[in-house]
Image: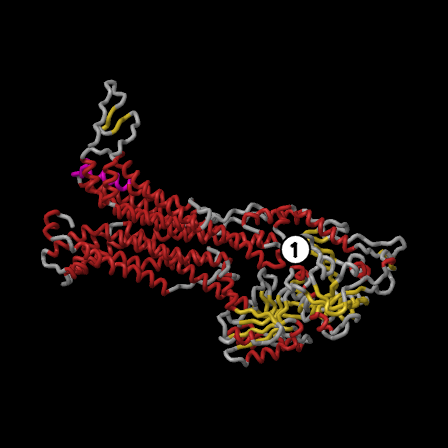
Amino acid sequence: MRARPREASASGAVGWRAGLWPVGRWWPPALHWPSVRGRARADIGSLLLAAAVVAAVTLLAGVVPPLLRATADEAVQDGVRRAGGDGDVLVEARMERDDGPNGGRVRAPRLAEEVGDFRDRATDELGPGLRAALRPPVATVISPTLKITDGSVLRTFQLAYLAKGGGADGGPHRNGIGGGPQVTWIAGGPPRSVVREADNHAEVPVTGAPWPVQVGLSEADADALKLRPGARIPLKDDAGAVKKVLVSGIFRATDSTDPAWRTAPALLRPVSGADGVGSTRFAGLLSPESLPDARLAFDQDALRRVVRFTPDPNRITWDSAQAVSAKVVALKATSGSSGALDGSLKWETGLDGVLRNIRTQVGAASAQASVLLTGVLAVAVLVLLLAADLLVRRRAPALEAARQRGAALPTLGAELLVESAVVALTAAASGLALSRAVVPGASWEWVVPVVLTAVVAGPGFGTLAAARATRDRRVPANRTARRWARHTVQLRRAALEAAVLIAAVAAFVALHQRGILPAAPAPGGDVAGPGLGLGDGGPLPASAPVLGVLAGTLVLLRLLPAGLGLVLKRALRSRRPLAVFGTARAVATSARTLPLLVLVTSAALASFAFTLDATAGDGLAEGAWRTVGADARLDVVPAAAASTPALSRRIAAAPGVRQAVAAQVTDRARVVADSLVVAPRLVIVDASAFRRLLAATPLPDAPALARLGATGHGDVPALVRSGDGGLRPGMRLELLRDGAPAIRLTAVGTAPAIGDAGDVVLVDAATLQAAGMPSVPNTVWVTGPGAARAVAASGVDADTVLREDVLRARRAAPLTSGLLALAWVSAATLLALGLLGLALGASASAPERWQTLTRLRTLGLRPRDARWIAAGELLPPVMVAAVAGPLLGVLLARLMLGSLALRLLTGQAADPALVLPWWRLGLVAMALLVAVAVVVPIESALRRRRRLSEVLRAGDG
């Protein structure tokens, strides 16, 4: 029994209201622990169900943020790795002048040491933070481009000296040249000085004969040039001055993947297109002994001294990327002027841009993940509210009895709060423990709404139920007063619905105006952590799907009773009593809000997640088609480019190949447009064959290819494409060539996308050849199911790019794979929560439903007919959710996907087109309908154990 309240003092300082609660002083409620334990034992199943929901959602919400942070680290490393040379940090400085006392130039035998000192000076300028993120430096001294004068084909040559930095990765090598990469000399030997040691500091006249210099050639370069040790390479500079370069030996790289070779790839093999359309670049390797001779062989400032630092992806994380980006921007800000004649350091790098792009991609993925996770949390909150409502309905008699026996409302609320807090906090702790076991550093911020709902919903509903059961408010006898009370309730509901509608409209307006991406910081500014960023507009844009679904469901709640009323009127005119009973029961339960909210919201958000996954997947496939251009692509090396036409014909005849088109693709061609020199990708191809190739792929057709004929005024027609609008149809262009007149072009249309290049110029091969510029194809596009086998069996020295490999690599990219996995997990969780909400809603209305059906059984209703009536009661809201839920999800996807910046993850130039996964949407609808077919027999089996006499006597079922 509960203790009697203390009597009020004579002075009245401490009074009592209704004999139950002190006024003027706070007294803690006296909890009745046997009642707490008894209620918990009686409803252990419902409490465990709520605990399971809290634990599952806590596990998901706790795991996603740390996984996103780990994914951000992987994305940074993957992005830096893919950036290649664009992320390198370069520093350049002019060499000291070598003027002699007699007007000549003095040979500097210790020039290699000066290059090493310059490398060490640049390394010290980096600072410890940036230095730790970079690999050991490679110092290079590279000559201007020379022309090889022994043939009609445009071939160029450079002299290059490489010196790796000190340390475990960059120390001197016994078989290398100085501190350069390791090589093995297969003929001749390393370059030597052309003067005796006694003449190391000799002064050379400026106008004397060409100064000799020795270089080493790689096997590939020597074979292509047909040179042996001791031979002289016929070279001239742009001014026509002859250079005396001798071959000292032929080498083979010990490790051709050494990062040092990336600074001058022509040292290993000929490079096509490096110096313009149709050109092939070769290079000779200098040694510390021959470097001073190379300085004398060229003009005073002709040699370019550069130190290259390559980022180490394994040493850059999301956290360190901020400091790296800030330091890089600071170096560029303090860089010396390119026109300065002193030895100041001039820094150049695209690493800050690479990190900025990665930051944007991570921000997009974080915002997209927040949209999905917000939907899961919203549905989980609705399910917990529905579970709390079911629990209170079952406890209503006991709460009413306790209230009638004198229990105070605060005491009842405190008892229910203790119970729910123990259950919710224990479940949340279990979920967080599991999430920490799955991934370290589990987050709890996103768990708060779910735990708070689980703690507050049950006590709130229970206290309201107990208060309503014992309130003494009477129904007004005045009709006007009753109408006023009814209108007040309606106005409150309308105000709530209007608030939801306004919030939904505001969310979509903010989403379309600001987008989902976080605000871009200034270069080198602070980088926000990837803790599921909510975009530039805060949580409002991320909540747009949830608010949109809630607004749509409120509209359905307004329409459902009216629609069921019309169905009931029609059923009353029929001769089918089962339809009448089922529809009447559906009308009686149609006013319940939570069940329909749970069903429609879960179905709509699951459909939205499925649609996002399908659209992103299709965008990845389209991006792979654009990157490769066909099912397979062969990029032939310059030495084998002459055999490309025959190779194309041989591949076209292979089994399973539909199309094989050869073309010459040159990156960074020199084209004059509006008096400006741009560097687009030049594609020289048979226009008709290329159009047939496009027709055989999912790539967009290019009808403008038919215009690549004669223009009538001597210009070569071309198609252009530009990312910044610098190349437009109707423009007059000039294609620059070395040693030959420029080719005049006229842009007659828009070119199709060729790979990932932003600027493209496409011309017909036959038309260009008629204008005096023959092409040398170096690329073969192949389509058909046998394309991969055909290119694998080509037997030529070429790089093979397969569309399936590109698509697989992009799907496996950290951010993309993480988002697609989260979309599937979110959809599955939402569908499971929706089915759980259906079961809870059916359980809440089950007593009334089966009480009515059991009474009808006393009038002769068969058990099978009773199940049909029960199904008729449950089906209307489920059918509404099965139909309207996927439609709302598709509508949300159409309104939102354009603002989610999926293009940043799919690798496309524009956002992917909406793709509807019909079979998955049908699965969502079918799952809800099948659940009704499962719930009804289970309910019937459970209620069949009750005797008719008990129902008639007790008055409940």
Residue 734 visible? The answer is no
Q: Quadrant of the N terminus?
A: top left
| Residue 456: percent from left, percent from top | 32, 41
Seen from the viewer's position, the closer of residues 14 and 493 is 14
Residue at x 48% of width, y 62% of height: 811
Examine the rendered structure and indicate whether residue 322 appears above or below residue 153: above
Q: What kind of element bears circle 1?
A: loop
Task: Please name the amino acid that badge 1 sits on.
Answer: Asp
**What's the residue at 24%, 45% (across, down)?**
43
Residue 329 percent location from the top left of the image: 63, 48
The residue located at (52%, 61%) in the rendering is 907
Above or below for 225 versus 43? below
| Residue 23 seen in the current view | yes
142 horizontally vs 690: left or right: right
Q: In the image as oriented, which residue stretches furthest toward the top?
A: 11
Q: How many marks?
A: 1
Q: Nearer the viewer, residue 702 or 926?
A: 926
Q: How is the image coloured?
A: secondary structure
Farthest-out residue, bottom: 653
Is 531 one of the magenta-colored residues? no
Q: Residue furthest right?
A: 102
* Secondary structure character of the magenta stretch overall: helix
Question: Residue 947: image x %, image y %?
Answer: 12, 53
Q: Is residue 846 left or right of residue 719?
A: left
Judge from the rendering whether residue 501 lies leftward or rightward of residue 11; answer left or right: right
Residue 821 image point, x, y percent: 43, 58
Q: Residues within 10 Å of mark 1 (few under 14, many from 20)?
A: few
In the picture of the structure, the residue carrying the numbered disc 1 is: 169
**Based on the displayed image, in which of its 4 quarters is residue 611 positioned?**
bottom left
Taking the spot 66% from the left edge, 71% from the top edge, the residue there is: 638
Magenta range is 459-477
